[in-house]
Amino acid sequence: MPSDSSFSTHHSPLPTTQKPIIIVGGGITGLSAAWELQGQGVPYVLLEASDYLGGKVETTLTEDGFLIEKAADAFILGKPYAAQLAREVGLEAEVSHPRQDTKKLYFLRGGKLLDFPENLKMFVPLDDESFRASGVLSPEGTERFLDEVNVPPKPPTDEDESLASFVIRRFGEEALNFIVPMAAGIYVANPYELSMKAAFPQFLKMEQDYGSLIRGSRATPKASGHIFMSFRGGMGAFAQAIASKLTGDVRLNTPVLRVHSGSVTLAGGEELAASGVIVAVPAWYAAPMLGDFAEASSLIGALKVNSSVAVTLSYRAADIPFDMNMHGLLVDASEGVALKAMTVHSAKLHGRAPEDHVLVRCFFVGLEPSVARRQAMAEVERLLGATGEPLNHWYGDWRGKNPAYQVGHLEQVAQIFAALPPNVRVAGASYTGVGIPDCVNAGRTAARALAEQIKAAQALA
Ligand SMILES: Cc1cc2nc3c(=O)[nH]c(=O)nc-3n(C[C@H](O)[C@H](O)[C@H](O)COP(=O)(O)OP(=O)(O)OC[C@H]3O[C@@H](n4cnc5c(N)ncnc54)[C@H](O)[C@@H]3O)c2cc1C
């Protein structure tokens, strides 16, 4: 990654007859906003505090041939925005999908690795028998789960509900232990706090449309083809591909201190004029930056965050007797261990580790990174029989950096949007979805809205 303060571009700059739109933050949200503005012919300046573009989307190729993902390792195709952007920046030839031949998953329950039930749509069984056979719940818990078809839908309401309340209401108390590791994983959330309306609106809709998630899931066709997408060079290749197509003013090592309605102040004191500003940094950075807008700043500062730590370990394949041709394992929420999930990157996607080596990433909540590393090693030994020490380890320290999306989140976000002037937008994972497709959509939507405003103002002038 380049580390000089101005990022060189490949094409001639756009004409700058007007003040640019300033984008604060060069993560996937900010990059998507810049790409959209460029497509609309609107001048922009992208200001990134660090010495690289991509933010949480960053891939490192180690000297010994391991491909380490800092955060996302793939994104869902059900929302088309990220795949569409990948096409627009010419990445088709680099696309890679999670391997079908290694898609085995396990579920850790009662100290045993059980085969994950087959024929699920997300967490909903498409047939009763394979769910019964899996043993992921007790016999009583299983029957209560399958009895969801007979649970009447909640009367239509605009009120939000927590994931735990929804799951217990529809599938029974024990179902939480099975559903939470899958459903709450991406949000690293407390299920009693996680907003259904913000995180899983499709299930609320299905309850209303079909009266039952089991009935609704069985009545609608399962997506055919690939569900997730990544790239040969890892997710970092996506950020790099967008960055390499940007022809506007992109500045690295340029932290923004303060945002005003017609300018931003840089950490060095310089003030840059702007026709509009897109603040594409997480809420915990955005709140102090937006101090000029007291109400919005305090609402943004009130958005809760959760903590997690990811530890990636590399091994010689010969040191792990377990068959590592699997995507990984999920842990029953009542298991009483710190480990929440494990992904076997070396088997999930091609090209993540050299031949005869294994690369696993373990997720923890509420641990110090060094403690998490020891726990990760101990779990790989206990569950998979590792005999030797790992060759290397890498941390993803996400303490205080996971947007929590608490019950009422959408209403809070609507208030934040309304409290900002029309030419100052916030966008990204803290507000309208943490997944890469949501971030792409958020960046482009904010850019489109500002571009329209500018064009409308120009038409009037
Ligand atoms: C462990 C983990 C695993 C994940 N796995 C997946 C997955 O598999 N699939 C998926 O779809 N999503 C996944 N996600 C979520 C996804 O990676 C993030 O939500 C997304 O990358 C956030 O992008 P962003 O641009 O909104 O924010 P960020 O990536 O945080 O970018 C914000 C940028 O702003 C910059 N910045 C901060 N302060 C300033 C300032 N003052 N001035 C200028 N710049 C500033 C930062 O340096 C950064 O570059 C995962 C997240 C984590 C943590």
Image: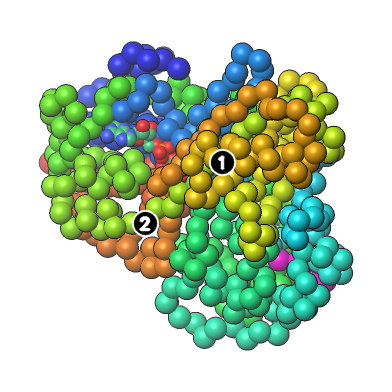
> What residue did someone put label 2 on?
304
> 64 or 52: nearer the eye?
64
| Residues rendered magenta in the picture | 124-128
In what element is the residue under mark 1?
A: helix
Residue sitting at x 16%, y 51%: 293
Horizontal side, residue 66 vs residue 244: left or right: right
Question: Is residue 86 shown above or below 357?
Answer: below
Nearer the observer, disc 2 or disc 1? 1
User: Residue at 51% of width from left, 38% of height from top?
Assistant: 369
Q: CA distance from mark 2 to mark 1?
A: 23 Å
**Which quadrant contains ligand 1?**
top left
Q: Amino acid at mark 2?
A: Lys
The total number of labels drawn is 2
Task: Say few, some or many: other residues with alpha carbon within 10 Å of mark 2 (under 14 / 14 to 19 / 20 or more).
Answer: some
The residue at 81%/75% (across/down) is 139
Give the answer, above or below, for where 301 lies relative to 128.
Answer: above
Residue 339 is situated, as x and y percent measured from the top left of the image, at 62, 49
The answer to whether residue 18 is visible is no
- Residue 272 in magenta stretch: no
Residue in the foreground of this view, choosing between 79 and 436: 436
Query: Percent x, y for residue 159?
Result: 42, 77
Look at 79% across and 59% down and name the residue there: 117
**Height in image: 152 above or below 419?**
below
User: If the image is split into quadrants, where does the N terminus sit?
Assistant: top left
Amino acid type indicated by mark 1: Ala
Residue 346 vs residue 319, the one in the foreground: 319
**Rendered image: mark on residue 404:** none
> Residue 357, how many percent across, how many down?
76, 25
Q: Which residue is mark 1?
A: 372
Q: Secondary structure at mark 2?
A: loop
Q: Is residue 167 above or below residue 339?
A: below
**First of labels 2, 1 by sequence position:** 2
